[in-house]
Image (cartoon, rainbow, N blue to C red):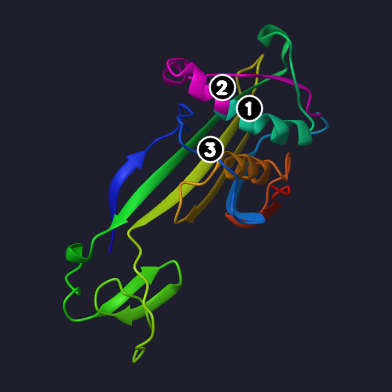
Amino acid sequence: MWKPALTTTLLAGALLGLGGCAALNAVDSNVSTYSQWPAGRSASTYAFERLPSQQARAMEQEKLESMARHSLQVAGFSEAGEAKAADFTVQVGARINRYDVSPYDDPLWWHGGLYRSRYGYGYGRGPFWGPPGYFGPRYYDTTYYDREVAVLIRDRQSGQVVYEARAANDGTTMGSDGLIAAMFDAALKDFPQTGINPRRVTIQLPPS
């Protein structure tokens, strides 16, 4: 049983501790997008918009926004010198949920059952993974993370939301700055179009 042991909400950009580079060559994310983008309008200038809670954590939010800047540039946006001169406002957020696996939370602990691990699903006593009748090495996962980033784009004059994008994935580590940045790339990859929600988007990471 996957028990939420600690939830870290990063809508204010609290990404401290995510340093380092991703261990994989690509990042796969489940992406959902929703668009009311005006027909015939092109991406132009933008300024970041912050919630009061994000303003209270200005340094962390600046770090999060820096991870999204490249994605916005690739989508065709350029950051305005002054917020009042921008055509659009952009709000970005992220969260990371941590789950701890406790064998004592599962009533099947003592007589075997189906468990989830990074290696798939299998049967065994407690969280030790393996197929039925398997007596080889077994693996024990104690921590799992799911991650999500979000982008909200508004027309600055009207205040109308014209585009919303989210990208989510999971793994056995919190991730890295590069991984979060790649998730923003995935979220805005199809801008201003939408598609099947959710859909799998793969972003190749630059060489470390």
Residue at the limit of the structure toward the bottom, as seen here: 133
Question: Picture coordinates of residue 117 (x, y %)?
Answer: 39, 68
Quadrant containing the N terminus is bottom left
Amino acid type for the residue under numbered disc 1: Ser
Q: Amino acid at mark 2?
A: Glu
Up the image or down, 134 lies above or below 83; here it is: below
125 in magenta? no
Sequence-earlier tag: 3 or 1: 3
**In this picture, which residue range is highlighted in magenta?**
42-63
Lateral position of residue 42 relative to residue 32, left or right: right
Mark 3–mark 1 distance (CA, rounded to whole Å): 14 Å
Crowd class of label 3 (few under 14; some 14 to 19; many from 20; radius 10 Å): few
The question of residue 49 being in magenta is answered with: yes
Residue 190's place in the image compared with 106, above or below, is above
Asked if the residue at tag 2 contacts the one at tag 1, i.e. Cβ–Cβ closer than 8 Å, the answer is yes
Picture coordinates of residue 135, whole percent (x, y): 34, 88
Determine which of the numbered discs, if any, sits on residue 19 in the image.
3
Q: How many marks?
A: 3
Q: Position of residue 189 (x, y in %)?
A: 72, 45
**In front of the other: label 3 or label 2?**
3
Residue behind mark 2: 62
Which of 99 and 36 lies nearest the eye of the viewer?
99
Q: Is residue 99 visible?
A: yes
**Residue 37, percent from left and from top:** 71, 33
At a point 31% along the width and 74% down the height, the residue shown is 128
Q: What residue sits 46% from the left and 51% below the top?
A: 173
User: Circle 2 — which element?
Assistant: helix
SS of the residue under disc 1? helix
Residue under label 1: 66
